Structure formats: structure tokens, C-alpha cells
């Protein structure tokens, strides 16, 4: 019979041997690997939702984004409010709306999936992606603490994105984009998340049709744009517009948008001391749309128009 201390040593050795093969492979259930401190890719379900406070030079909103549909390749993410979907369709400020790949939570930029993340996330890991019209961001996991990974991405031209992924939220909790001059052009901060959304969700898959700013003491404009179809070949079913008007105390005039058959789709009298922003959608008609603007007095008018394919889901 082995002495007691030898039995104890043998049991200890066996325990170590049994444990060693599993190191680096134990997941706590929320994507945290307890041995190597890496964060695994989460799996989303219908009704997962995240609400973000979003600030840009043009926008200051709180948007709730929802997993509205799941197919073999992508999660389809929509807005819980149609107004948010319309605003994004014209100003294109929210990179997380639309399709997100199931394989690596890739965000689509001009139809191409981009690795905002590269799972599993590990300290020091790096990769590249294109986003917000900027190519060749080099991302690096700066640190991982308490189930959160801080990632810093810089481009060769000087733009920077700093963002944090949370295993609890299963998505990013903050994202800040600054340009080459150090100006903050996009800030997104998570204010709430859940997995039980119930209601209607909207997304507008848009393409730019027209964008112009008129700023003068006297303006008389006649212009046009063509409404056709998405790059996929599918005809737009909505025309989405963003109209910003600012006038002085002596300014007055009219803004008119006509559809291809001559119907006045938008008529806006411009009165003194106006400071207004509006946006919405119109039924699309293929062909030439007409813009008419006549104004006297100091003013600033901005118009952005996009064609869109509209999607709605009941979740």
C-alpha cells in the first residue's frame, strides 16, 4: 500500500492531467473564455435590441436597433421607429443598421462585409477593414477587462475609430469616429439592451440620388434628378428626402418638388425667421423629378434625396 502522502501526490497529479486539456476552452456562457481572457462571437436571436444615443454634426437621436430577421448568411437589423430609418436613409449616419453577417458580425459597406470585429477577440490581435468611406483601417484590441474589449482602429490617412465590445451586451457599447483634423464626426453610446422586442421594425436600403445646399441673398433654382433602381436592379419603391430651411427676418419664397408626371409631391412656403428640419418618404416613380426653389432674402436651404427599398417586419 502506498503511503498517504504518495496517494495524495498521485491524486493531485491526476487532477492536473485531467484539467490541462481543457484550459483555454471553457466558456462562461456569455462569450468569455475564463482561461485565456478571449471573447467569443455571440449568437443573436430575433428580438435582440440595442438602443444607442447617436450624435453627429447633423444628428442627435436615440435609436433602437432590432434583430428583425435571420437568414442563412446575415442578421437583418432594423429600426424600431420608421422616422429613424428614414433619417438614416438620407444622412447615412448609422453603420450598424442593415445587414450584419452571422459568421463574424461583419458590417456591410457598399455591399461588402467589413470586419469591425475579428472573433475571438484577444489582447493584441489586429485586422483591417473599411468603414464610413475610409479604407484600410488597422484595428487592434488594446485591452480586455471584465468581458469588455477596447479596440482602436486607425487609417493611413489619419482617421480613427475607438470602440468597445461587451460580452454582456453582445455588441458594442461605445464607438467614436474622428477625422484627420481630430473632429468627432460620429459618437454612439449604448443606453439600453434587451432580447425581448415585440413590434414593427423598419429598414430602408437606400442609394443617394441628390444632395445640394443653396445659401445666398437671392436664389432661383430649377434642377432635376433621376429616380431609377437599386444596384441590384430592383426599382426603388420609396423616395426619401431630408429638407433643411433657414431664413432671415426679411426672407420669403417657395420650395417645390415635382414627381415625373408633374404632381407636386412637396410644397413648402418659406416664410421669414424659419429654422426647420423635416424628413420623410414618398412613393417612388421612375423618371425625372423636378426641384424648384425661389427665395429672396438671406437664406440657407439644404436638400438630400435618396431612393430606397423599404422593408418592414413584425417581431
Image (tube, grey):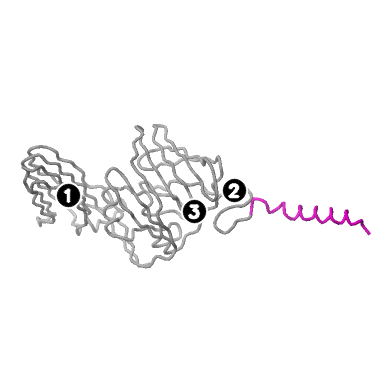
Q: Are marks 1 and 2 in contact (CB under 8 Å)?
A: no
Residue 246 percent location from the top left of the image: 14, 44
Q: Are marks 3 and 2 in contact (CB under 8 Å)?
A: no
Tell me the quadrant of the picture where the C terminus can be found: bottom left
Residue 213 percent location from the top left of the image: 18, 41
- Label 3 crowd bin: few (<14), some (14–19), many (20+), radius 10 Å: some
Between marks 3 and 2 in the image, the one whose residue lies nearer the viewer: 2
Q: Residue under circle 1?
A: 276
Report how many numbered discs are placed on residues in the image: 3
Q: Residue under circle 2?
A: 37
> Residue placed at 44% from the left, 53% from the top?
101
Where disc 3 sits, the SS reads loop
Comparing 254 with 191, the one in front is: 191
Where disc 1 sits, the SS reads strand
Residue span colored magenta:
1-25
Tell me the quadrant of the picture where the N terminus can be found: bottom right
Q: Which mark is residue 103?
A: 3
Q: Earlier in the sequence, mark 1 or mark 3?
A: 3
Where disc 2 sits, the SS reads loop
* In the image, farthest residue toward the right: 1
Q: Is residue 115 visible?
A: no
Magenta residue check for 58: no
Amino acid at each position: 500500500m502506498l503511503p498517504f502522502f504518495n496517494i495524495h501526490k498521485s491524486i493531485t497529479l491526476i487532477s492536473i492531467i485531467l484539467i490541462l486539456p481543457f484550459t483555454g476552452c471553457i466558456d462562461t456562457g456569455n462569450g468569455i473564455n475564463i482561461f485565456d481572457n478571449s471573447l467569443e462571437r455571440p449568437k443573436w436571436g430575433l428580438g435582440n435590441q440595442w438602443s444607442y444615443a447617436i450624435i453627429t454634426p447633423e444628428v442627435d437621436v436615440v435609436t433602437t436597433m432590432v434583430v428583425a430577421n435571420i437568414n442563412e448568411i446575415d442578421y437583418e437589423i432594423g429600426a424600431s421607429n420608421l422616422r429613424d430609418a428614414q433619417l438614416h436613409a438620407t444622412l447615412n449616419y448609422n453603420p450598424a443598421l442593415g445587414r450584419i453577417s452571422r459568421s463574424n458580425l461583419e458590417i456591410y459597406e457598399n455591399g461588402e462585409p467589413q470586419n469591425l470585429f475579428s472573433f475571438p477577440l484577444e489582447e493584441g490581435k489586429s485586422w483591417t477593414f473599411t468603414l464610413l468611406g475610409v479604407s484600410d483601417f488597422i484595428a487592434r484590441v488594446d485591452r480586455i477587462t471584465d468581458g469588455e474589449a477596447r479596440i482602436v482602429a486607425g487609417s493611413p490617412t489619419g482617421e480613427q475609430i475607438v470602440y468597445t465590445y461587451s460580452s454582456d451586451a453582445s455588441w458594442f457599447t461605445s464607438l467614436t469616429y474622428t477625422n484627420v483634423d481630430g473632429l468627432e464626426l460620429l459618437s454612439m453610446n449604448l443606453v439600453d439592451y434587451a432580447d425581448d422586442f415585440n413590434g414593427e421594425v423598419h429598414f430602408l436600403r437606400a442609394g443617394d440620388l441628390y444632395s445640394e445646399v443653396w445659401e445666398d441673398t437671392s436664389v432661383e433654382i430649377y434642377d432635376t434628378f433621376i429616380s431609377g433602381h437599386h444596384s441590384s436592379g430592383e426599382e426603388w419603391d420609396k423616395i426619401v428626402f431630408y429638407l433643411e430651411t433657414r431664413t432671415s427676418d426679411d426672407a420669403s419664397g417657395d420650395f417645390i418638388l415635382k414627381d415625373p408626371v408633374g404632381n407636386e409631391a412637396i410644397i413648402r412656403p418659406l416664410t421669414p425667421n424659419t429654422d426647420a428640419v423635416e424628413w420623410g418618404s414618398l412613393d417612388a416613380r421612375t423618371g425625372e423629378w423636378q426641384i424648384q426653389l425661389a427665395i429672396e432674402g438671406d437664406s440657407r436651404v439644404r436638400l438630400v434625396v435618396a431612393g430606397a427599398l423599404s422593408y418592414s417586419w413584425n417581431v
